[in-house]
Image (cartoon, grey):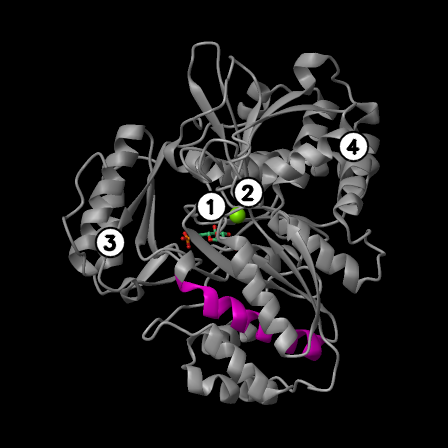
Amino acid sequence: MDLDAITKHSALHAKPSGLILQYGTAGFRTKAEHLDHVMFRMGLLAVLRSKQTKSTIGVMVTASHNPEEDNGVKLVDPLGEMLAPSWEEHATCLANAEEQDVQRVLLDISEKAAVDLQQDAFVVIGRDTRPSSEKLSQSVIDGITVSGGQFHDYGLLTTPQLHYMVYCRNTQGQYGKATTEGYYQKLSKAFVELTKQAFCSGDECLLLKVDCANGIGALKLREMKNYFSRGLSIQLFNVGTTGKLNHLCGADFVKSHQKPPQGIEMKPNERCCSFDGDADRIIYYYYDADGHFHLIDGDKIATLISSFLKELLLEIGESLNIGVVQTAYANGSSTRYLEEVMKVPVYCTKTGVKHLHHKAQEFDIGIYFEANGHGTAAGDAISDMLVIEAILALKGLTIQQWDALYTDLPNRQLKVKVADRQVISTTDAERKAVTPPGLQEAIDNLVKKYKLSRAFVRPSGTEDIVRVYAEADSQESADSLAHEVSLAVFQLAGGVGESPQPGL
Ligand code: 16G
Ligand code: MG
């Protein structure tokens, strides 16, 4: 590595002084204008990681469901997984190093991680459709080339597609071809094969409306549509020609507001789904004949998939061990249904795909979903959509029948602004607050006031806020409990600004 060249180039991607960023749940994420130096340095780090693992490493430029003005970056490890935790720390150190320290931090990391600097390095890059993404991915490339790495820039990709490319390249094509065409072929072939024996046919069963959040999902689904045209007909909405990315649409909007996105025409009982901005989340929903909106979240998706697999195993007399992994956000009804009706063991981990993924690997068949619609290996809205559509077709289930598996407990999520969200620490997979003192007792006392109730708080890993979750036997109770817990957080954890108001 030519350290002098790195220092020279680094100065062209100077770090704004005083800016400290953290490699969080899903990489670095903040306003796009603050990220140039992080991108350059993640190019450098990807080269080191590639040398160390002697494998291809991925770099994805995206801020997922965040507003269009934000951006972010994350590294993808050799088997298409999230970056190993020890390297997350290296990433944070490198991103926050002052200009004059970049060389030293690079050498430090190389030494600590026993990187053979003579080794070749290869990095693949993908980006979402944000206006800032192209320039930022150029900064990643700058970092790669100046540190002597080779690269392939895939340009526009969904996040899961980049994970797929990395995995294919590191398994010498055994998993699939490392091209978008290879991805389309692999997934659609599996879908077409699976649905050959489908019980359900006819237009009504086959139509699915997809809200693409004005993001990358629209471009990729449009390309992919032709590969499975016989099995499924999809209509795309919010394709990015007029609306803003993730604005009033997309999986995060639908889940957190519990209402349909703008820009989609929904008739009663029509099956609809929303992707997020980088197409790794999916949420389903519909209007019933009385005009009521029904949300089908990640919990119900996990239930559909695990019930299907459990039935298949019973049918063929296999006794593979099967487990479902959820987070504290999983609706209480889903956990109860899985454990008591389906008799499937359920485990709870901290929020963030990597935690669920890790746990799921302990089973012969591990199924995991966050309530917000993140599931499977790295979360892939397209493959999740196909598996759901295949199961519905094979079982001849309508969206209402799927929805009727169990009834969600009414719930509410709120955000509270505090001076330092790290004053809140949690245990028991984020279900209990350890600090600040008195907070958990206050929550316990509030929960006691309501029926079938549960509440927890945790510092967000992606925004500078504390998240509050509450569920109870009625929407009114869930709203009221969430509000009271917000007040407790505000009072005991250093709330800033106006104190939480009911109904917000
Ligand atoms: C990120 C995570 C997602 C998690 C969310 C929580 C990945 C790929 N994404 O989007 O799994 O649900 O953060 O956000 O891990 P929060 O910490 O702000 O609640
Ligand atoms: Mg996402």
Using the numbered discs, state the Cα–Cα distance from disc 2 to disc 3 in whole angstroms.
26 Å
| Residue in the image at 73% along x and 53% along y | 364
- Is label 4 in a helix, a strand or a loop? helix
Q: Give the crowd class for mark 1: few <14, some 14-19, many >=20 residues within 10 Å.
A: many
Disc 3 residue type (three-letter): Lys
Return the x and y of residue 342 as percentages of the image width and height. 61, 36
Q: Are marks 1 and 2 in contact (CB under 8 Å)?
A: yes
Q: Which residue is mark 2?
A: 281
Give the magenta range: 34-53
Q: Main secondary structure of the magenta part?
A: helix
Q: Which residue is mark 4?
A: 227
Q: Earlier in the sequence, mark 2 or mark 4?
A: 4
Q: Earlier in the sequence, mark 1 or mark 4?
A: 1
Using the numbered discs, state the Cα–Cα distance from disc 1 to disc 4 in whole angstroms.
27 Å
- Mark 1 sits near ligand 2, with its Cβ under 8 Å away: yes
Using the numbered discs, state the Cα–Cα distance from disc 3 to disc 1 in whole angstroms.
20 Å
Q: Which residue is mark 1?
A: 65
The quarter of the picture where residue 449 lies is top left
Q: Nearer the viewer, mark 3 or mark 4?
A: 4
Q: Which residue is mark 3?
A: 417
Q: Quadrant of the C terminus?
A: top left
Disc 4 residue type (three-letter): Tyr
User: Could you tell whether 325 is left or right of 410 in the image?
Assistant: right
Q: Earlier in the sequence, mark 3 or mark 4?
A: 4
Disc 1 residue type (three-letter): His
The quarter of the picture where residue 236 lies is top right
Return the x and y of residue 49 as percentages of the image width and height. 64, 75
Q: Nearer the viewer, mark 2 or mark 4?
A: 4
Q: Earlier in the sequence, mark 3 or mark 1?
A: 1
Q: Earlier in the sequence, mark 1 or mark 2?
A: 1
Disc 2 residue type (three-letter): Arg
